[in-house]
Image: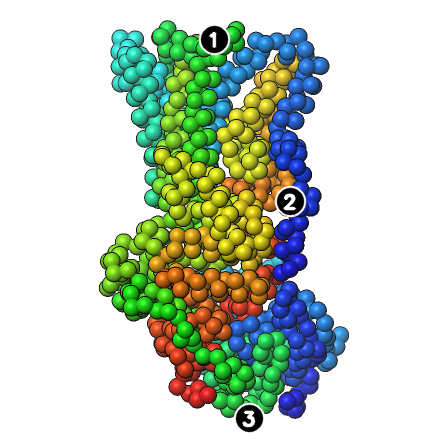
Amino acid sequence: MKKTEAIATVGLADGKAPSQWGRLFGFQNISAVYLFVAIFIIFAIWVPQTFLKPQTWANLLDTQSLVVLAALAVMVPLVTGVFNLAVGAEISFALMLSTTLQQTAQDQPNLLLALGLPWWAAAIVVLIVAGLVGAFSGLIVTRLKIDSFIATLGVASILAGVMYLVSQNKPLSITLDYKAVTDLYLDLGGFRLKMAVIVLLFIALIVWYILERTIIGRRMYAAGFNPDGARLSGVNVDRLQFWGLVAAGLIAGVVGILAGSKFSGNSTIGGTMLIPALSAVFLGSTQFKGGRFNVWGTVVALYVLAVGVQGLLLVQVPDVLSDFFYGIALIGAVVLSRWGGGRRRFRAVRQATTFTKDGKAALIAEAEEEPSQLHPTETALKQDGIEDQGDRP
Amino acid sequence: MVATTATGELLLQITGMYKDFPGTRALDDVSLEVRSGEIVAVVGHNGSGKSTLVKILAGVYTKDAGEVVFPSSTDEEATELHIVHQDLGLSMPFNTIENLGLVHQSAAGLAPLNKRRERARAIELVSRFGEPFDVTVPVSGLAPAQRSIIGIARALDGWKHSRNIMILDEPTEALAAGEVEVLFDAVKKLAADGAGIIFISHRLDEVLDLADRIVVLRNGQKVADERRETVDHDRLVEFVTGASAHEGEVGRTDLGMSDEVVLEVENLAGADIEDIDLTVRAGEIVGIAGVLGSGREALPALLFGSIPGRADRYQIAGKDYRRRSPRESIRRGMAFVPGDRGKFGSIRPMTARENVTLPELKSVSGAGGAIRVRRERAQVQELVAKYDVKPPRTEQVFSQFSGGNQQKVVFAKWLRNDPKVLLLEEPTQGVDIGAKQALYNAIDAAAAGGAGVIVCSSEAKELVRLCNRVLVMRGGRVAAELSGEDLTETRIVLEGYGLGNEGSL
């Protein structure tokens, strides 16, 4: 025991522990920032004329802000241990609903929901419906005890069907008022902060505050890390997962409303956001907070990935390569977060990316084998004679 | 002390086996011989080293010193070691044929299976041990004894000759009395054919029924190796418990109990537990003992409300408490230190600070549920110092503490708000001696502070050290209540095995 205690002590701070600043700026903690620098240098040399133009960056910030929001809609439930793979469908659905509600009955006589609402009224309806969609996923996951992966995939498919009923794949045009929503901006001494970015900052701040500064956030993390342990500490895991999915639905609703204004009735937009969003969430978990899904890690990770994609587009590679890039990034991010040093770092992600019950059990069993964990012998000894659950030395 | 049975050739010879685990010597110079046709029972209490011995033979652990030889093993007739583990290792959704076939495939790779031949073979194998049964239903639908037979049949299939070693690890755990007989007949038949049997058990009467020779382990040492004829029940109990050594220690009477009842339960039932009446007073430490499966492990969770149960009456500090849940139990002043701290007692990737405050965050937060981290850290710093957590870092991740210090953090977490009722499950499992003492002191202090404490433990010694009263469970009910002079390690062990009346020690 002495020995393991010594290891636990030395390994942490007395021995190799870098200074606080060293840790803060260490590769492990902010690898995305280093990645960004590398990407930046490469493209700055390769295509300086276009890559270094301020307009490029302003555009990037604006267009990607919706994807960042989508990533937050993935992250919030994921903190409580629940996947939300319906996020893309939720966004597309919100977009189509928002657009359809603003159509007038004269223009679209076949559409039941063409009510000719002003954009803000449509937005309110969309937010309510989006919240209900999240609640629907939440009920399936917490009441029916269906694995969130399956449940949200199912919900995504259902939403695609409902979306067709709502819009019937009609080409829809949007009003100028609605289009103007995302063109609003805040002038910060020549730098225009567009509407979508403002909304993003606003929502990110709220999510950050709740997750990292409040009781609810603390409990959400606890629920995600170890639902059984959290439950025994008085955490209502089901409730947190339910509301996590509701929050995700609401954020997706906001994205849908903004995307409607920006991209008109393009219903495919949500689907393209899922993979970048997932990549960013996992890559983000390796940043800043060592293994915890966190807001700023997600935001930074997404923009870093987006810069990479932007660079690729500027050197005129075919469009589809961005899919290729994000796919690689998603797998790479999970690999990085699983193996990127520090048990604490990868455990959260492994927990989230291990889907079977047996797999989870194996993770726990593996955890028991850590040197500083349960004294395996004594456990074995205690079980000696009456119990054999295949505990390993 | 050395057996002189010479029924047959020596099949297995273990000499001077040692196995150390950090802090404990699990096997201390253990020697064992098994001859052809002989049934050797290895008995001992928890922690005696039986399982370690089996696991070394099975290759799960490696021995530190000692020799294992198979003296009559030749090239043509190698002595094989066949082990039937306690859990049998059957695959429940599969039927008997498939379970038997899992080891010896009748067809290789993609070649079609020969169903009829497999079925005939399966019936042939199982009918060696009495009435054949339907080999085509899933194993989960069979009786426990039938499953044991499959386990043994599987271990028996493919023997090239009969003179092998068969190890049965607690094979009767799941069996009813009649089923045990079927199994024993099978084992005897096997021995009669020339196999050497090692029979691991803690059921002394069964051991006396079956064995030719009895080896007793205690604290890793072999304390007896006797022919069956030379041992009677009382002798065996003496060997197993080492009765005389601990006779001095009895339950404590020094607890400053008050008359105030903190927990009163009538007719509690749930999981495998029935009919539990329990009254705990402030300042009292009540122990719960019993072998695995007696209901001991489920009782604290049942009391805490983390598994569903029902009760005619359930009161905490005189107030009725009906819809039980962990959250509500905590609110009402209960605390629960679960046995498996990695899985249930903690959030391993979170820091000590976050773990300690998780059950109750209100006192460290301001308006709108905003956590005041500085206040929280100061509070946890104090607790970490109080419970002597090493290193005393509030920001260290839980999993990076050593076992004993993890448990101290868990204690700090639950003792932080002075619980009225403190439920402890295996409170010192897997902790070193130093931490153990610190934890005992913390439990004493909690009781002295007015908590009613319930300790569930598989370690009789611990219960004698801590408790003024111990309830011994058996078959889901309280079988005996021990206190004062009666509260000794020996009595706890005997009552646990249901030998209370005969154990005239």
- Quarter holding residue B194: bottom right
Q: Hey, what amino acid is under mark 2?
A: Ala
- Mark nearest the camera among 3 and 1 is 1
- The chain to which mark 1 is attached is A
Residue ID at (45%, 79%): B250
**Disc 2: CA contacts within 10 A as few (<14), some (14-19) or many (>=20):** few
Whether labels 2 and 3 belong to a single chain: the reply is: no
Q: CA distance from mark 2 to mark 3?
A: 62 Å
Location of residue B126 with respect to A199 vertically, above or below: below
Q: Which residue is mark 1?
A: A187
Q: Position of residue A4 (x, y in %)?
A: 64, 56
Who's the residue at 48% across and 44% down the image? B378
Real-space Cα distance between discs 1 and 2?
46 Å
Q: Position of residue B339 (x, y in %)?
A: 47, 60
In the image shown, does B341 or B131 lie closer to the viewer? B341
For label 3, the crowd category at 10 Å Cα-Cα, with few meaning under 14, some 14 to 19 and many 20 or more, is few
Q: Chain of mark 3?
A: B
Which element carries disc 3, helix, strand or loop?
helix
Along the viewing direction, whichever of B2 and B250 lies nearer the viewer: B250
In space, the residues marked 3 and 1 are separated at their CA atoms by 99 Å
Q: Nearer the viewer, mark 2 or mark 3?
A: 2
Q: Nearer the viewer, residue A258 or A184?
A: A184
Q: Amino acid at mark 3?
A: Glu
Q: Is residue A86 visible?
A: no
Residue depicted at 30% across the width and 12% down the height: A118
Q: Which residue is mark 2?
A: A13
Say which residue label 3 marks.
B229
Q: Quadrant of the N terminus of chain A?
A: bottom right
Which percent across, then down, holds residue A250?
A: 37, 27
